[in-house]
Amino acid sequence: MKLRLGPLPRTETVKMTITLPVTLKAQLEDYAALHAATWNEPVDAVTLIPHILEQFIGRDRAFKAARNRVSQERRSAEKPTG
């Protein structure tokens, strides 16, 4: 079996607090258990959340397009006129 989320990289982090539905928390815990078994490395649901979000956002084409547009608009606005 191949999970979409591969081995976890080491990253710099910032702490946030979120509220989840009970059913989603249970799914995350199940995913963490399966991930740990697949990669033979212990991991908990809290550790997986940022990686899952990163995967989700990284695959959202509409978000990427909108973000690129905003970035281009900022660069255009910052160009000196003259």
Image (cartoon, rainbow, N blue to C red):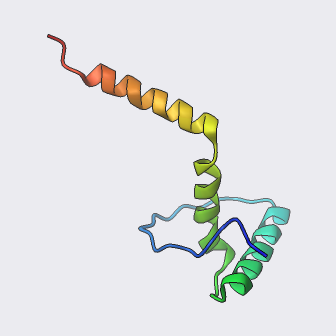
Residue 53, x across and y down, in percent? 62, 57
Task: Count the marks.
Answer: 0
**Figure quadrant of residue 65:** top right
Which quadrant of the rendered structure holds the N terminus?
A: bottom right
Q: Residue at x 55, y 38 (%)?
A: 64
Residue 79, placed above or below residue 58: above
- In terms of depth relative to the viewer, which is nearer, 21 or 71? 71
Residue 14, placed above or below residue 70: below
Residue 6, x across and y down, in percent? 62, 71
Q: Residue at x 50, y 65 (%)?
A: 15
Q: From the viewer's perspective, tell me whether residue 70 is left or right of residue 24.
A: left
Q: From the viewer's perspective, tell me whether residue 12 is left or right of residue 48.
A: left
**Figure quadrant of residue 39:** bottom right
Residue 80, x across and y down, in percent? 18, 19
Residue 40, placed above or below residue 3: below
Q: From the viewer's perspective, tell me whether residue 45 is left or right of residue 80.
A: right
**Figure quadrant of residue 38:** bottom right
Which quadrant of the rendered structure holds the C terminus?
A: top left
Q: Residue pushed farthest left? A: 82
Q: Residue at x 76, y 75 (%)?
A: 29
Residue 10, x across and y down, in percent? 46, 74
Q: Residue at x 32, y 21 (%)?
A: 76
Q: Residue pushed farthest right? A: 23
